[in-house]
Image (spheres, helix red, strand yellow):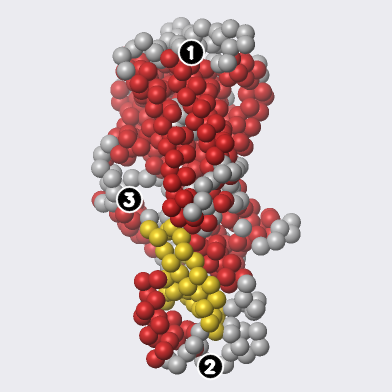
Amino acid sequence: MTDRATVPRPARGDAFAFPDSLLSAAARSHARACALLVALCLVCFLPGIVSLQPMDRDEPRFAQASKQMLETGDLVDIRFQAEARHKKPVGIYWAQAAVVGAAEALGVPNARTTIGLYRIPSLLGAIGAVLLTYWSALVFLPRRGAVLAAALFGACVVLSAEARLAKTDALLCACAVATFGGLARAWLRRDRAEGHRVEGPLDTATVLTFWLGLALGILIKGPMVPLFCGLPALILSLRWRSGRWLGALRPGLGLPLTLLIVAPWFAAITWKSGGAFYGEAVGHDMLSKVQGGSEKHFAPPGAYLVAFFGTFWPGAAFAALSAPFAWGYRREPAIAFLLAWIVPTWILFEIVPTKLPHYVLPLMPAIAILTVRALAAGALHPERRGARLTAGLVVLIPVGLTLGLSAFAFAYDRTLPWAGLPLLLGASAVAALAWRAFARGLPERALGLGVLASMLLSPAVFGLTQPVMAALKVSPRLAAIRDALPCPHPRVASLGYREPSFVFLIGTDLAMLGTGTEAADFLKGDGSLRGDACRLVYVEGRFASEFDAAVKAAGLAPNRVGTVSGFNINGGRRVDLSAYAATP
């Protein structure tokens, strides 16, 4: 394979030459390649990382549990308010608590309720995943192709989303890709193109990268990284009737190192919870996802394949065109490894009833590498039947988001996202240019233009459009009512609205009420409001009549201090809330 894809070079002044020139510049050295990829990541991941509200429900659950670690000083047990949160190991909570604790030490105001700080580990994890994809791709591709594969992964929609959410998946992906690169190097040593068998272990840096990725992945999400790397290792060993190639990873060094990293916390949580952590994490959280659609996330087999055309945009259409190439060369060692990483785990996730788009995220670096391998082999050709039509799917996501966000903003906020529209339209136009480049027989430039379209779309959606969509920011607007009260530390309760983002913004002691009578009793308290003390209760619209009857029966006349209407992302419905205060 040469250092360039087998496509014609555009003439000087060609409108499609810009991605080609950028790739050429990046391919001159590893430092330039990494600098370009980090710049791409910052453009795609940074916009909105501070202004985006806590996204219910998983993100604020993680952030609140990390916040409670700082509040209590307990770095072993994981809790959301008074409830034990024994679903995932401790890795992400330690990372978030470390960042927020450092921010507090540096004097950052309101650090514990600034969601952007809790997202920094995810941002770093996503950048790390892209750089590790480049490192992994160098086993399969020359430098230019490795840069393109990593850029294609860095530009994909699902990674862009996970990079700005304070939960496990971006860091988990980085750990999985670290094991992917190490495992690939061990596999491809066994049979080089010249046909000479390569004996002996890998270099120490590669071995440590593999085992550290495995160990940290276990601390972040338990068995998932072992699954991602173990299943392809098993498939390849069975297919070629030997597992001796795994010895290159030096398990005599790696297994004790892994045990040294993961054992202390697992021993501590076993002692502290009396074994309840494993009952909840394995017996409830994991098995409920395997046996049924946990937390209303059921989808039938094939759902990931359908969603793939959105989650892996802008590369999905071109990845689909790579499938015949992958099948035709499935016996080639490099392609066999990529397919072993992708296909068995993908099928497993399709079988499991509980489905979320980010579950297959660690498979996408291999898909990006496979796509560029197909490109380099000349397999992405517009003359193939249906190729132009398939490549045209690259235009659907930016056009769909432009129309969808505009319709939502008008329906809920009676406005249009004027600030983001120029970039939204620009992303749509560049995506159309990507399709045109492919139709002209320039597939490498088409991929490059697709990446450029993503670099326009991410700032448009997250940086310019979502900050002005007030309907999405229900919990922050409710918290602003609390902050405007004339007392510094009111007692707060909620009737009906129970989103974790609200707990994160209001505080761990937020009381969750079940009836209008409980809300009236909360406002009444012990009748001893004095000084600057006050009470505040939020009432969702479906409890309004019950609450009104209860306060009348109690002889109360609470002051309504604010109302909020908006769209609850988690429930997928409109919500209306009123805030009532009892002040001295």
Quarter of image, res 329: top left
Q: Nearer the viewer, mark 3 or mark 2?
A: 2
Which residue is disc 3 drawn over?
A: 297
Label 2 Cα neighbours within 10 Å, binned few <14 / some 14-19 / many ≥20: few
Residue 203 visible in this rendered orientation of the protein: yes
Residue at screen point 62% across, 70% down: 483
Looking at the picture, which amino acid does disc 2 mark? Gly
Residue 208 visible somewhere in the drawing: no
Tell me how far mark 1 sits from mark 3, CA to CA.
Answer: 40 Å
- For marks 1 and 2 on the same chain, the one whose residue lies earlier in the sequence: 1
Q: Tell me the amino acid under the disc marked 3.
A: His
Report helix, strand or loop for mark 3: loop
Question: Residue tagged by mark 2?
Answer: 527
Which of the two discs, 3 and 2, labels the residue nearer the N terminus? 3
* Pointer 1 residue: 442
Q: Is residue 350 above or below residue 238?
A: below
User: Where in the figure is residue 111, as x and y percent of width and height?
Assistant: 65, 59
The location of residue 3, given as percent across then percent down, is 55, 11
Q: Earlier in the sequence, mark 1 or mark 3?
A: 3
Q: CA distance from mark 3 to mark 2?
A: 45 Å
